[in-house]
Image (cartoon, rainbow, N blue to C red):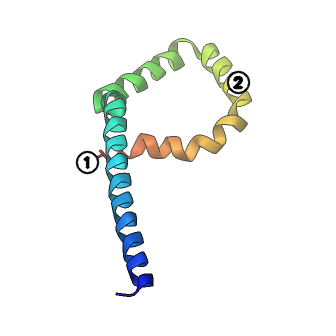
Amino acid sequence: MTRRSSVLELRRQRLIARSAALRAELEQDGRELALRFAVADRVLGVVRSGPVRALVLGGAALVLFWHPRRLVRLASRALLFWPVIRPFLPSLVRLWRDPPTPVP
């Protein structure tokens, strides 16, 4: 083996070892994040369930029929924040419709 090829082989071995270490570190970080978000995933699962959605819609219907002035006042205040909310709307709709994929 020439000197250049031995230097390249040594470099290759170091890069392989570094890659394995980084992969293990990334896997550990992913596990830690999955543990942190486990509670949030459970809460979102409950919120997206059918009964909770029915409760929210029922509550909205009650507010609409019992206190229409409050609803109009709330809508007029919400219009002030529309320019802020609008860029996030596609993400919110996607989050509402599609459940998050679990981390293996």
Task: Give the amino acid at mark 1.
Answer: Pro
Query: For the point 70% across and 30% down, which residue is it?
Result: 81
Left or right, 92 with respect to 41, comes to right
Task: Give the amino acid at mark 2.
Answer: Ser
Query: For the point 70% across and 24% down, which residue is it?
Result: 76
Query: For the point 37% across and 37% down, which residue is it?
Result: 33
Of residues 21 and 76, the one nearer the viewer is: 21
Left or right, 83 with respect to 51, comes to right
Q: Position of residue 45 (x, y in %)?
A: 31, 33
**SS label for mark 2:** helix
Vertical relation: 15 (above or below) 31:
below
Q: In which quarter of the image is the N terminus?
A: bottom left
Q: Sequence-wise, which precedes: disc 1 or disc 2?
A: 2
Residue 104 circle label: 1
Count the marks: 2
Q: Dot 1: few (<14), some (14–19), or many (≥20) neighbours within 10 Å?
A: few
Which of labels 1 and 2 is toward the front?
Answer: 1
> Which corner quadrant of the image does residue 100 belong to?
top left
Vertical relation: 48 (above or below) 69:
below
**SS label for mark 1:** loop
Query: For the point 43% across and 40% down, which residue is it?
Result: 96
Residue 25 visible somewhere in the drawing: yes
Q: Where is residue 60 in the image (x, y as percent from the top left)?
A: 48, 22
Residue 48 visible somewhere in the drawing: no
> Which corner quadrant of the image does residue 99 belong to?
top left
Vertical relation: 75 (above or below) 22:
above
Q: Position of residue 7 (x, y in %)?
A: 42, 76
Query: From mark 1 to mark 2, how far is it between C-alphas?
Result: 44 Å
Of residues 9 and 28, the one nearer the viewer is: 9
Residue 76 circle label: 2
